[in-house]
Image: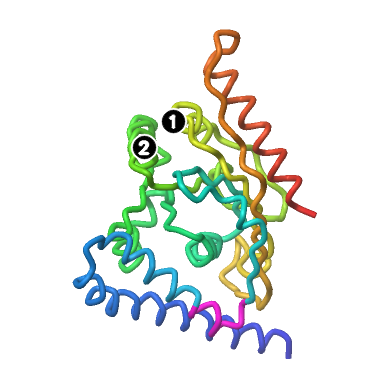
């Protein structure tokens, strides 16, 4: 009986996902025609459609620490990564538009390709080091333009609740731009959709936002590499502390 329920629920949720993405594609294409800032309009409409999709799927979610998000400046969200659901959850719950650094392979998915491009998200080819470095320069430009970005520094989804080793990209950008890091911990999504499975389980997602990490200016006593390492360790510890 349990396997039958899981099969039916999985089919139902994937149907909701397909309908949500397709409906957003059709409706927002007309909606943005009447908006001056089309990129921001795509973000708002995507957030609304995702919240609707989560509601119809019976997936509950909660966010704490929203007061820790800077109101008048751009910032860098650094979060653990458990599931494909993480991106949708952050898009639905973020108090203002955030831009993702996504792997280039996602551009092969037709409607997702359209969403990523229209909303201005950044794609990185993890197999091409030179291209990845160039795209990090694009990330810095976004931040200096007042746009906020989100990094999953593990580089890929964890197959369990624990965190993998961090990569340095997010912290290099933070040091070079001087922008605040907002540490976040997302839990529950690995139970909804595990890394090695397409089966979807009902459940609840919790996002905890920690106290901002203020990025200090480089001093003569430390090299940029040392500063990045220190910042990475401080942020990682703050994220771990958000996991009760």
The image shows residue 186 at horizontal and vertical percentages of 64, 57
Q: Is residue 151 left or right of residue 192?
A: left
Q: Residue at x 50, y 67 (%)?
A: 92
Q: Left or right: where does residue 210 sit relative to residue 16?
A: right
The quadrant in which the N terminus is found is bottom right
Q: Is residue 115 left or right of residue 242?
A: left
Q: Left or right: 167 with respect to 117?
A: right
Q: Tell me which residue sits at (31%, 66%) in the image.
A: 41
Colouring used for the render: rainbow
Q: Which residue is mark 1?
A: 177
Residue 175: within the magenta? no
Residue at x 67%, y 64% (from the top left corner): 206
Which is nearer the eye, 17 or 232? 232
Count of marks placed on residues: 2
- Residue placed most toward the observer, 209 or 226: 209
Residue beneath the point at 49% across and 35% down: 179
Q: Quadrant of residue 239?
A: top right
- Image quadrant of residue 117? bottom left
Q: Nearer the viewer, residue 129 or 203?
A: 203
Residue 108's x, y, as percent?
A: 33, 59
Label annotation for residue 144: 2
Mark 2 → mark 1, Cα distance in angstroms: 7 Å
Placement of the C terminus among the 4 image quadrants? bottom right
Q: Which residues are magenta?
A: 52-59
Residue lying at the far right of the rendered structure = 244
Horizontal and vertical percent for residue 9? Answer: 60, 85
Q: Are marks 2 and 1 in contact (CB under 8 Å)?
A: yes
Callout 2 environment at 10 Å: few (<14), some (14 to 19), or many (20+)?
some
């Amino acid at each position: 009986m349990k396997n039958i329920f899981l099969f039916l629920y999985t089919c139902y949720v994937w149907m909701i996902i397909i309908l949500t993405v397709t409906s957003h594609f059709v409706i927002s294409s007309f909606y943005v025609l009447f908006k001056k800032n089309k990129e921001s309009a795509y973000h708002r409409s995507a957030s609304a459609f995702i919240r609707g999709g989560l509601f119809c799927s019976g997936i509950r979610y909660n966010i704490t620490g929203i007061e820790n998000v800077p109101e008048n400046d751009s910032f860098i969200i650094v979060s653990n990564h458990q599931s494909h659901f993480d991106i949708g959850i952050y898009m639905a719950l973020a108090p203002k538009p955030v831009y993702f650094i996504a792997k280039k392979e996602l551009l092969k998915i037709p409607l997702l390709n359209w969403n990523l491009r229209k909303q201005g998200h950044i794609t990185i080819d993890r197999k091409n080091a030179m291209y990845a470095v160039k795209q990090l320069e694009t990330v810095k430009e976004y931040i200096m333009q007042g746009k906020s970005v989100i990094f999953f520094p593990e580089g890929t989804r964890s197959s369990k609740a624990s965190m993998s080793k961090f990569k340095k990209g997010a912290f290099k950008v933070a040091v070079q731009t001087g922008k605040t890091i907002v540490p976040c911990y997302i839990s529950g999504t690995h139970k909804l959709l595990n890394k090695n499975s397409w089966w979807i389980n009902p459940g609840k997602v919790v996002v905890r936002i920690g106290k901002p990490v203020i990025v200090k200016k480089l001093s003569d006593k430390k090299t940029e590499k040392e500063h990045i390492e220190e910042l990475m360790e401080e942020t990682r510890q703050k994220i771990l502390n958000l996991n009760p």
